[in-house]
Every structure is written in structure tokens, then in C-alpha cells.
């Protein structure tokens, strides 16, 4: 049976998250109550039968490494295959590669050693609960050189990057890749390619001093390569800015989106912790919210996302907000359109009101007196 | 170097008084507190006391328990040479037998304990909810040079006749053991936690095994025997978080107590973590129509109805217009629309159809409902 390996390439990730990425890379941003962005891609990979995942990291990856550990929570602490974090540290004096080609060049041995025939390349900012295996089967069946995963999703307010649009013929072959936003079919950033072809194209890129593998090879060689597509239907999101991060958290509070992402589907896997169940106090009022374990809620929470271990005191009102791990909100507080990063303490009787377009954000470990 | 202490955890009991709750699983595997199983507390005590060699003795309906414990990784007991071992009854060249009593279970695993040649053996059971540092007991055990130390807890005098009572001198030296005495002389009840010098226990286990009249039980046979031959035995007085969940009524009460407790000193005590097998369920979704007060609710739950004074385990879904009060809902229960549940315990994987009413009168023990008992105990109300 043909095998795929996974490659998560973080070199070209957009980083316009302000306070949220002062100390972490975008892939490690907490999302939807208990996850980090990378969990979605990683979960899709392992449930598609991928047993080996490599990760090109380039900066601020301490939190990411802490989160991933040995990969045990994704079933990647394996005898064969497993998780390989490949940080950017290399000292080859003959190296002339640039951009993300440096990762490919300096980790070439790793690709040779892997027994997988195909590579599924992905970023971390496309969020969906999907099965890459169907895309892989289509790739094999059509005999394509490359298969792009496409999706149709409305651009959220604040999406920074215009995702490449894909123009198809009637058999789903790619005719062109462009930036015309009237075409709803977008490239998700995920594609499947044979390993030998990948390495061949990497060599060509390095020889011609290219800096972006996808741009240079696939976009630039559409006339030479057979490029297929596999279309993802159902809920999906691109998260590449503070505004899109806020908007997509709020989108998940709609029952249909939550159900599409989490219910009656294989679970999204993440690092598990040891928190007790959520405790609701005698005067709690909670509605339209996602609440993670370990929270103690004594006040009012509406239309908000609460991460693990958050404490909401009595007589406090939280609305349209995202409260991350272990935040402590004292009584008499009023929060609306606010993002609190981890370990923020809001002391008594504070009032913080942001706007839906510009949520008020407090960085990690701030204490607001 | 010899090991200071090896723990032997008795987890093979049926827990008869829990009736329908233990129909398909052993008492230590009964769910508790919205997330845990009863054995989690004893295993976490071992981890937190840095006891890293634990034999778990299983017998009655062990499947759920075995899958829960696995290799012991939630408790950090998946260690290369020590760690956790599941010790089930076995056959060998000379035949084999079920564990005939608590003492027999240890007797049949003498070879397991001998591997580590420990100074002491701690015998505990997976039946109680408590936080205990076994090292404090070990310290006293070594200080008094006792052959056996038995952990006790003070119970109200009027209830003392329900327990196994240890009569002690002022220095806590034990001179008599009375099982459920009609006229108790003391109010120190045995918690079923024993610490023995291994060589002394080993000798008594071998003698007990060939004793025809013995029922091979620690409380009934071995402890009285050790007292009668003059072994030095001391009581260790425990003070702290402890709950008995022996009957359905006490099981229900112990769960309800959690709703009024400061969890930071019980389930969520940061200095004494309670570890459990963790599953990867999504965070709970509280819908617009939900109304929740006084509740413990675990991951993966999807709540559209009203929850009042109840404990909900993982993956429970509650339909709109439903009301759940003073109840315990075990994992993976699906509750339809317009259901009313009062003072009941709903077992794992049960589906409650729309319009069902399940209500236990306040004078009765809470009903235990599963797919089998549901048709007999519930009333269906047609709202249309």
C-alpha cells in the first residue's frame, strides 16, 4: 500500500496577530477552547493514515515544541515513523539555498530515510476537520503529479492574505492559479506530491535561486505538471490575523459550525491536561458558549469561548469574548469583545469594551488592576 | 538496594451494595465526580506519595478497569523496571484458582512481591475517595518498628457499630479488632489500608493459605491472627479528605457533595492532583437555550436544556426543554427533548427518548437507569 508522510511547513505563515504572537509562532496560537492551530492539520494527517510527520519551524517555537512533545497525543510516538521537529539550525558552507528551500536542502537526508512514497505538504492556518485520505486516493487514481486541496470559504474580516484562487477544467485539473477574488475556489495551502518529484523540484529551485518552493515550482510550472484538485466541503477557516482569529472563534459558537467541526466526526486531537469538569455555581448564567474543562463559572457568560481553568467570579458579565487558559476574572467586571491571553488577571470592577472589528487584546500574564 | 515499599492494590471486588452500578464493571471502575473512576484516587495517592511499584489485583468484571488503567501512564506508572502491573488470577503447572479472599490474592502473588524484595508492603483497595500521603504512615510504621500499621479514621460514636473498629492504647498500639461491634469501645474505624513488614506478612500469608477454617480475608482472618500471636501492631490516625461510596445512596450523596465543595481542596487540589485517563473530547457547547446552575459538566457535552444540582460526565447531550436535577449522568448518555430527570443515576451509553420522565421520590434511594431498566422505571409523557 502506498504511504504518505506529512510535512508541516511554517516558513511562510502569516504573522499579524499582534500580542498573541509576541512569544509564540502562529501555529501555537490557542483556538476554540482547548486546541492550538496546528492541532487541526496534525489531526487530519494522523486520521488519514499518516504515521510520520515532519515540521519545518523557523521562529518562536518553544511553546510549539512544549505542546507537541513526543507527539504521543496524536498517536505519533511510534516505533515506525513518528513526529520529527526540524528547527532551523544548519551550518553547511556549500549551502546556496534560500527561503523555505533551506529547510528542504538541509533536511534532505530525512526525506531519503523515510519509507513513504508521497508527501502531504501543509501549513497550519487552514482549519477544518477533514480526511486527506480521500484526496490521496484521488491523487493516485488520476495519476496527477500534484493534487491541491481546495475549499470554498468566505474571507473573514481581517484575513490578511489573498489565498490563491484555482481555475479548473471539467475534470478538476488546474488551468491556472491567480488572485481574482471573484473566483470562490481557494487553494487551502495543502497539497500532495510524490517524494522523488518533490526532491527533484527542490534541486531545480535551488539551482535557480528561488525562495518559495510552492510559488516557484507549482505556480510557475503549471504548463509542465499535471495538477489535480480535491475539494473540501463543510466548515473551514483561514486564520492569519488577530481579526480573523477573533471572528473564527465567534463563528464556532454557531451550533451548525460547532457540530460540523466537532460532533459525529473523528475528534480533533490535542495535548491533554488533567483538569476537572467545569463547575457551574449557583448563580451562573451561561449561554451560546464553548467552555473547556477546569473552568469555575459563577457569573454570566454569553457568546464567548472559555479555555481551560478559567475562573469567572460572581456579578461578572462576559460577552463576545475569548478568555484563554487560567485567566482569573474578579467580581463586578464587565468584558465585551475582549481577548485575554493566558494567565491574565482582571481585578475587581474593571470595564473593558472592544469592538467586533477591533477586539481589545491583553497580552499573556497581564494583571489589570 | 531493596525497595522500601511495594503497594498492592485490591481492585477485584464486586461492590455488591452498589447493585446495578456494578453489573458490568468492578467497583473501582465505577465513574465518580464527572470525570474520574473510583480507583483514580488510590492510584493518584500512590503517584503523589512517590510509590512507584504498584500491583493491581483484578478479578471481577475487569475489562473496563483494565482499559482504564492501561500501562498506568496517566499516573506516571509506565516505568521501565518498576511501575504498574496488573495481577489477574492465573493458572500454572500445579493448577490455578480464583482469588478466594483479599489475603489469598496477595498470597498468590508472593512471587511478584519477592522480585522487588521490599522492606514493607502496603495493601490498599480501590474502593474509597480520599487523599492520603502513604509516606506519613510509613514514617510512623518505621518509627514504632511495627509489624503492621493499620490506617484508621475517627467516625461518630453512634455510627461506630457499622465499621470494623480497632481498640487501641493511648500510644495507638492495637490490642483488639472488632468487626461491627454492638457496643463499640472505640471510634477508630479501619480504612482497609494496611502496611506490613514484608517478611512478617509473607510468613502469615503462607500459614493462612493452608489453614482450612480461614476465609483468607485481611480483616476477618489475618489481622486477628497476627494480634493473637502477639505481633506489634499500631493504628495510624488519618485526618483529611475521605469519602465512602459503598451504597447507591452514599454514592449519590458523595457526588452531590462535590457541588458545594471548594474543588481546589478536593478534585482540583493542585498539591495533590487526581489523575485519570484523559480522552480527547471537544470543549463543551452550551447552547442559547441552556440554563445551568450548581453543576459539574465534563468535556464533549452539548447542553440545550436546564441543569440544576447535577453531575454530568463526558459526551452527554441534553435536548431543549429538558430538565435534569439532583442527578448523575454517566458518559455518553443521550437525552432527548422535553425529558425530566429528578434524583436518578443514568448509566453509561443510555439513550433517553424525548418526553421521558424519570423521578425518584425523596424518600427512596435514587433510581439507577440503563437501557434495560428504562422501560420499567420511566413514564413517557406526550407533550403533543
Image: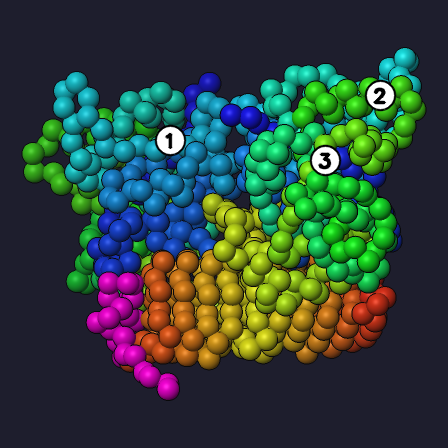
Q: In the depicted view, which residue is nearer to us: A65 or A148?
A: A148
Q: Circle 2 sits on which residue?
A: A204
* Classed neighbour count for the residue bearing mark 3: other residues with Cα under 10 Å, few (<14), some (14–19), many (≥20): many
Chain ID of residue with mark 2: A
Outermost residue toward the front in this view: A170
Of the residues tagged 2 and 1, which is closer to the observer?
2
Check chain identity for marks 3 and 2: say if they share one: yes
Task: Determine whether A17 is above or below A99 in the image.
Answer: below
Q: In the depicted view, which residue is nearer to us: A37 or B346?
A: A37
| Mark 1 element type | strand
Q: Circle 3 sits on which residue?
A: A227
Check chain identity for marks 1 and 3: say if they share one: no
**CA–CA distance in space, label 2 to label 1:** 56 Å
> Does label 3 or label 2 sit earlier along the sequence?
2
Q: Are marks 2 and 1 in contact (CB under 8 Å)?
A: no
Residue B258, image x and y in percent? Answer: 47, 65
Of the residues tagged 1 and 3, which is closer to the observer?
3
| Mark 2 element type | helix
Magenta-tinted stretch: B362-384
**CA–CA distance in space, label 3 to label 2:** 18 Å
**CA–CA distance in space, label 1 to label 3:** 54 Å
- Image side of residue A38 versus residue A279, left or right: right
Amino acid at each position: 500500500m502506498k504511504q504518505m508522510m506529512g510535512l508541516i511547513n511554517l516558513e511562510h505563515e502569516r504573522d499579524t496577530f499582534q500580542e498573541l504572537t509576541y512569544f509564540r509562532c502562529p501555529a501555537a496560537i490557542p483556538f476554540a477552547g482547548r486546541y492550538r492551530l496546528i492541532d487541526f492539520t496534525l489531526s487530519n494527517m494522523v486520521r488519514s493514515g499518516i504515521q510520520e510527520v515532519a515540521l519545518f519551524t523557523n521562529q518562536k517555537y518553544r511553546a510549539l515544541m512544549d505542546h507537541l512533545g513526543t507527539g504521543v497525543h496524536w498517536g505519533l510516538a511510534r516505533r515506525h515513523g513518528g513526529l520529527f521537529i526540524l528547527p532551523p539550525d544548519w551550518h553547511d558552507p556549500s549551502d546556496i539555498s534560500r527561503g523555505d528551500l533551506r529547510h528542504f536542502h538541509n533536511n534532505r537526508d530525512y526525506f531519503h530515510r523515510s519509507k513513504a512514497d508521497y508527501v502531504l505538504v501543509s501549513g497550519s492556518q487552514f482549519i477544518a476537520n477533514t480526511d486527506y485520505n480521500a484526496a490521496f486516493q484521488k491523487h493516485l487514481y488520476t495519476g496527477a503529479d500534484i493534487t491541491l486541496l481546495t475549499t470554498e470559504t468566505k474571507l473573514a474580516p481581517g484575513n490578511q492574505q489573498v489565498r490563491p484562487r484555482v481555475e479548473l477544467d471539467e475534470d478538476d485539473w488546474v488551468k491556472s492559479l491567480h488572485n481574482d477574488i471573484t473566483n470562490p475556489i481557494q487553494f487551502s495551502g495543502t497539497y500532495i506530491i510524490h517524494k522523488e518529484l518533490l526532491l527533484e523540484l527542490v534541486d531545480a529551485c535551488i539551482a535557480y535561486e528561488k525562495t518559495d518552493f510552492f510559488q516557484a515550482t507549482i505556480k510557475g510550472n503549471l504548463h509542465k505538471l499535471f495538477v489535480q484538485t480535491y475539494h473540501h466541503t463543510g466548515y473551514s477557516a483561514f486564520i492569519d490575523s488577530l481579526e480573523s482569529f477573533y471572528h473564527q472563534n465567534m463563528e464556532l459558537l454557531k451550533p451548525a459550525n460547532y457540530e460540523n467541526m466537532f460532533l459525529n466526526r473523528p475528534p480533533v486531537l490535542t495535548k491533554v491536561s488533567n483538569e476537572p469538569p467545569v463547575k457551574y455555581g449557583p448563580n451562573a448564567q451561561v449561554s451560546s458558549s464553548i467552555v473547556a474543562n477546569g473552568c469555575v463559572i459563577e457569573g454570566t457568560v454569553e457568546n464567548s469561548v472559555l479555555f481551560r481553568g478559567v475562573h469567572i467570579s460572581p456579578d461578572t458579565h462576559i460577552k463576545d469574548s475569548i478568555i484563554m487558559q487560567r485567566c482569573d476574572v474578579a467580581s463586578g467586571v464587565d468584558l465585551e469583545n475582549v481577548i485575554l491571553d493566558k494567565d491574565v488577571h482582571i481585578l475587581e470592577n474593571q470595564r473593558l469594551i472592544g469592538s467586533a472589528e477591533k477586539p481589545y487584546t491583553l497580552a499573556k500574564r497581564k494583571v489589570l488592576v | 538496594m531493596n525497595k522500601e515499599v511495594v503497594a498492592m492494590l485490591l481492585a477485584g471486588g464486586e461492590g455488591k451494595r452498589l447493585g446495578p452500578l456494578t453489573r458490568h464493571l468492578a467497583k473501582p471502575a465505577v465513574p465518580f465526580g464527572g470525570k474520574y473512576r473510583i480507583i483514580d484516587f488510590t492510584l493518584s495517592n500512590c503517584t503523589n506519595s512517590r510509590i512507584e511499584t504498584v500491583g493491581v489485583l483484578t478479578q471481577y468484571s475487569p475489562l473496563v478497569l483494565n482499559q482504564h488503567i492501561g500501562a498506568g501512564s496517566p499516573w506516571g506508572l509506565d516505568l521501565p523496571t518498576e511501575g504498574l502491573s496488573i495481577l489477574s488470577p492465573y493458572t500454572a503447572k500445579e493448577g490455578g484458582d480464583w482469588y478466594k479472599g483479599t489475603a489469598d490474592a496477595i498470597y498468590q502473588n508472593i512471587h511478584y512481591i519477592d522480585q522487588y524484595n521490599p522492606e514493607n508492603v502496603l495493601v490498599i483497595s480501590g474502593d474509597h475517595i480520599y487523599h492520603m500521603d502513604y509516606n506519613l504512615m510509613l514514617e510512623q510504621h518505621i518509627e514504632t518498628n511495627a509489624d503492621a500499621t493499620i490506617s484508621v479514621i475517627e467516625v461518630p460514636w453512634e455510627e461506630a457499630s457499622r465499621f470494623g473498629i480497632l481498640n487501641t492504647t493511648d500510644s495507638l498500639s492495637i490490642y483488639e479488632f472488632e468487626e461491627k461491634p454492638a457496643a463499640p469501645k472505640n471510634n477508630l474505624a479501619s480504612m482497609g489500608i494496611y502496611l506490613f513488614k514484608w517478611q512478617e506478612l509473607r510468613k502469615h500469608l503462607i500459614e493462612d493459605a493452608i489453614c482450612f477454617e480461614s476465609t483468607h480475608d485481611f480483616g476477618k482472618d489475618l489481622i486477628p491472627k497476627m494480634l493473637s500471636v502477639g505481633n506489634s501492631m499500631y493504628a495510624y490516625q488519618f485526618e483529611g479528605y475521605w469519602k465512602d461510596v459503598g451504597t447507591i445512596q452514599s454514592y449519590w450523596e458523595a457526588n452531590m457533595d462535590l457541588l458545594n465543595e471548594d474543588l481546589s481542596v478536593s478534585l482540583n487540589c493542585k498539591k495533590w492532583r487526581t489523575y485519570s485517563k484523559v480522552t480527547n473530547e471537544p470543549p463543551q457547547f452550551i447552547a442559547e437555550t441552556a440554563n445551568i446552575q450548581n453543576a459539574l459538566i465534563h468535556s464533549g457535552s452539548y447542553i440545550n436544556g436546564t441543569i440544576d444540582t447535577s453531575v454530568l460526565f463526558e459526551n452527554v447531550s441534553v435536548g431543549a426543554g429538558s430538565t435534569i436535577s439532583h442527578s448523575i449522568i454517566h458518559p455518553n448518555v443521550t437525552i432527548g427533548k422535553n425529558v425530566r430527570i429528578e434524583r436518578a443515576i443514568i448509566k453509561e451509553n443510555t439513550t433517553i427518548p424525548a418526553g421521558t420522565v424519570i423521578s425518584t421520590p425523596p424518600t427512596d434511594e435514587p433510581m439507577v437507569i440503563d437501557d434495560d431498566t428504562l422501560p420499567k422505571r420511566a413514564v413517557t409523557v406526550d407533550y403533543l
